[in-house]
Image (cartoon, coloured by chain):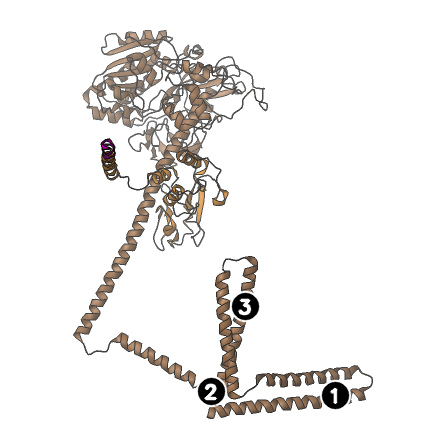
Chain colours: A brown, B orange
Amino acid sequence: MGRVWPFHGGVHPPENKLQSNQSAIVPMPVPKQLVLPLNQHIGAPAKCLIEVGTKVLKGQLIASAQGFVSANLHAPSSGIITAIEERTLPHPSALMDLCIVIDTDGQDQWVDHAGIDPLSVHKGKLLQCIRSAGITGMGGAGFPSAVKLQAKSKINTLIINAAECEPYITADDRLIREYSEQIIAGIQIIRQLLDQPACIIGIEDNKAEAIAILSQALTGIDGIAVAVIPTKYPSGGEKQLIQILTGQQVPHGGIPADLGLVCHNVGTAKAIADAVLLGQPLISRVTTVTGKAAAKAGNYQVLIGTQVSDLMAFAEVDLAATSRLVMGGPMMGFTLTDHQVSVVKSTNCILASSELELAPVADHHACIRCGQCEVVCPAELLPQQLFWFAKAEEFDKAQSHNLADCIECGACAWVCPSQIPLVQYYRFAKGRVKTLHAETQLAEHARLRFETREQRLIDEKLAKEEKRKARAVAAAAAQAAKRAANPDAEDPIAAALARVNQQKQAAATSFTAEPPEDAYKALKTAAAITRTKLKKSSKALTDALASGHEQVESLQTTVDQLTLKADAAKAALSAYETKLGLDPEHEKQLQVTAAKAGAVVRKLEKSLATAEDAAAIEAQIVIAKTAHATANQALETYQHKSTALQQQTQES
Amino acid sequence: MQSLYFAIMVLALLALVFGAILGFAAIRFKVDGDPIVDQIDNLLPQTQCGQCGHPGCRPYAEAIANGEAINHCPPGGESTIKALADLLDVEAIPLDAEHGTEAVRTIAYIREDECIGCTKCIQACPVDAILGAAKQMHTVIVDECTGCDLCVEPCPVDCIDMLPIEVTPASWHWQPPTDIIATSNHAHHAAPQGDVSHG
């Protein structure tokens, strides 16, 4: 029996193991339905290999590992695949994910399988055998075991974790008592894979019977020692057990393999033995069902994928008496809100606690800075500081206080007199740190892509410009060559220019040939247009001045220019008129007189319709009509004269 | 009098020597570019959305270095403002609502049945996250999308949706406990205290 070292902190919660470790493991009958999540392990989810409606046999591969860190999944019993759909996961988030649903046929018919003799095969084959059996760590974390057995560095010591330090759980205890031969066989296979390192089985001193059985089974076997360690939570934590058994600390951010160590759970050792010696993949496990609400508390051999509700019914759990249903132990487990979730490869305990066993989540008080949490922290952190940082969302500071080293054992929360849910704060902080880290990486990636794109666009633009230049040069050269070949040919550009010039000149002459009457009209129109433009611009200017618009100055210039233009147009018009001897004022006067006379006539005619002394009005109408006729005649005479004048000018 | 000349000579000599050292250092340890711009750029979310009024995150980083306000980045939100305030040693100010409000991060999805293959969104995407060709269906490479929203407006058939990122069991993380302090006024005192453990 080897020497043991102490580790910092730790707590002694009531063990509560007697409720479930007194009876032998009971195999649970095949349930009607099995639900297998595709991702029961750490790493990439397995890839589904079967379709709905397929008939599967017990032990048949139904989903294969994707990538290095992943695990195969096998049908735990024979039956028909009835669905591949999203179901609630046995996860604190209670989110949904893809699961394979098997309706069992009750025959529990095995697929063809056979074990191999580990001593007669090479390591690669052995490792392949373990990998294809889909074995993951049975202790709780669910890391694919084959990955840990493929050590890159030399492993000096193999540590088998049989501490089972968490209260209530007795699955490993019973497993050792009943399957010590298989466990030792599994350990020998692991040792063979790792080039025969020394092996220490760490087991807490509260499992006297298991220790006795194990020691007896080990008589005559060299290289495997049992180390009995004092019962203290969390001595079963990987890093804590390593420190207890070797006195070494796993460095920050490192793994046990850095120290030449590797750690496996007893359950994993048994699963490895079953896979290699019997050819049976990991399709069932021992799960403790305990708590005051469970009438038949004990350990059960449960098929992976069994619904928690089925298991509870089998263990006669009184749902009414259950105040909190926990998957895992009371220290590190999580509360299940939905009972329709599966037992997975890492489910070691279902704890149906009555109200007096586990306090319902109570209101917590303010931190009184008692320092108890620091005393019990097995990772030698400052839980109180981490709590403040997590609460204030100062994740940088939390990280610099080694938040990542927290193993979330819950010892700090257990001793906290203010009942602060410390672990939840650390989990939250860890999650946020992870998210922030991922976001930073995404941002970096996006920046790279953005910069690459910008560069590409610039390059494309430059390349286009280059091409254009090259084309221009080539065209010029071709043109020159053409001219050199035929020097007498007319230059097409010069010819085109000459044509345009000719057209322009023709247009200019036609303008001068315009009849003077049209010229007079044109001048009139030009004067009117400039007048309107000026009016508009002046209005805009006044508006702009009133509203203090910024374009006042430019408007002012426009108005000035238009005034000049309008004046010029007016001057041109009057010059033309004088030249012809026309008097527009006189014409206007004549027009007005005629119009007025017309209006008088119309008025009189109107009043005639209603008037009484029609004769008097009729006389007036006659006078007015004469006046109107005279005015019209004067206007006509004038217009005639003016037309004659214009014609005269035209002829001359 | 001689000591005065001597002193002046010594000082002049020292000035020359130190001048030479400084000149050498200025060339030897020359820093290319503006490191503060890089530092600011590193804190920005790199969404390249242009909501700050600049064509990308780096131009905004340059603008901040030249004195623009640090609260014009809605995708970065309060946390970015805080980080920038820490870096530049200025006071953190609330997000300028004129540039938008902090929202859940979204990802663009093209309703592929409706896409007519016009390539307009491809040209708008600042990070080349849209795949497609003329008259062929386009699709968004979800892992590359920054959720900048720039592809939505040019789409002539309006077939791009900005959807919030779904929480998966892998991306889920714990929320902080709802902060009920038993001693505070609005706490519920009904919860009985357990006698065993409360892990």
Identify the image quadrant of the N terminus of chain A: top left
Q: Nearer the viewer, residue A393 or A154?
A: A393
Residue A635 image point, x, y percent = 62, 88
Residue A359: which numbered mark, if any?
A: none
N-terminal of the pair, mark 2 or mark 3, is 2
Task: Give the residue drawn at x 67%, y 90%.
Answer: A629
Chain assignment, label 3:
A
Q: Same chain for the residues at labels 2 and 3, yes or no?
A: yes
Q: Is residue A171 visible?
A: yes
Q: Main secondary structure of the magenta part?
A: helix
Q: Which residue is mark 2?
A: A515
In the rendered structure, the answer to whether residue B148 lies left or right of residue A125 reads right
**Image height check: is A10 above or below A532?**
above
Looking at the rendered image, the disc whose residue lies closer to the viewer, 1 or 3, is 3
Q: Which residue is mark 3?
A: A536
Tell me, yes or no, whether the two marked residues, 2 and 3, touch with CB atoms within 8 Å.
Answer: no
Outermost residue, front side: B1
Residue B143's image quarter?
top left
The CA distance from mark 2 to mark 3 is 32 Å
Reply yes or no: does residue A139 show up in magenta: no
Tag 3: residue type? Answer: Lys
Q: Is residue B137 visible?
A: no
Q: Which residue is mark 1?
A: A621
N-terminal of the pair, mark 2 or mark 1, is 2
Chain assignment, label 2:
A
Disc 3 is placed on an element classified as: helix
Q: Nearer the viewer, residue A155 or A606?
A: A606
Residue A44 image point, x, y percent = 34, 32
Where does the magenta region start and end? B1-9
